[in-house]
Amino acid sequence: MTTRLIYFAWVRERIGMAEEDVDVPAGIETVTDLLRWLKSRGDGYEHALQYPDVIRVAINQEHVEHREKIAGAREIALFPPMTGG
């Protein structure tokens, strides 16, 4: 199944693109699994996701925890930590 990944702020800058469509490999079941897999895809991904615990994630426009299952996700967005102002 193809899933659209959307990257925001410095995650986007480090990866080098705003979004992409990917076929998530079998065995990638949770957000944690997805982040680990993405990190293995190259230097930009590794740099953007070197501290995966700080990355916020939304599945189909709803914020989720990293233990959330990604099955059926049409869209997954990755955000850096939010700061107030």
Image (cartoon, rainbow, N blue to C red):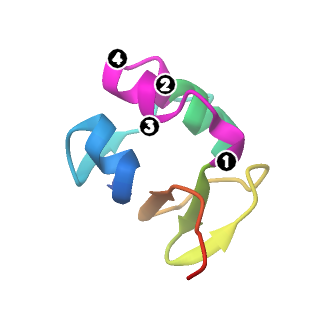
Q: What residue did someone put label 3 on?
A: 24
User: How far separated are the C-alphas under marks 3 and 2?
Assistant: 13 Å
Check if residue 43 falls in the magenta segment.
Answer: yes
Residue at position x 70%, y 66% in the image: 64
**In the foreground, 51 or 71:** 51
Q: Amino acid at mark 4?
A: Asp
**Boundaries of the magenta span:** 38-54
Residue at position x 73%, y 50% in the image: 66
**In the foreground, 69 or 18:** 18
**Kind of element beneath mark 1:** helix
Q: Residues within 10 Å of mark 1 (few under 14, many from 20)?
A: few
Residue 17 screen position, x and y as percent: 20, 45
**Kind of element beneath mark 3:** loop
Task: State if disc 2 and disc 3 touch (CB < 8 Å).
Answer: no
Q: Nearer the viewer, mark 3 or mark 2?
A: 2
Question: Which numbered disc covers residue 39?
Answer: 2
Q: Is residue 39 above or below residue 35?
A: above
User: How far separated are the C-alphas under marks 3 and 1?
Assistant: 22 Å
Q: What residue did someone put label 4 on?
A: 43
Task: State if disc 4 and disc 3 touch (CB < 8 Å).
Answer: no
Q: Nearer the viewer, mark 3 or mark 4?
A: 4
Residue at position x 46%, y 30% in the image: 38
User: How far separated are the C-alphas under marks 3 and 4?
Assistant: 19 Å
Residue at position x 52%, y 33% in the image: 49
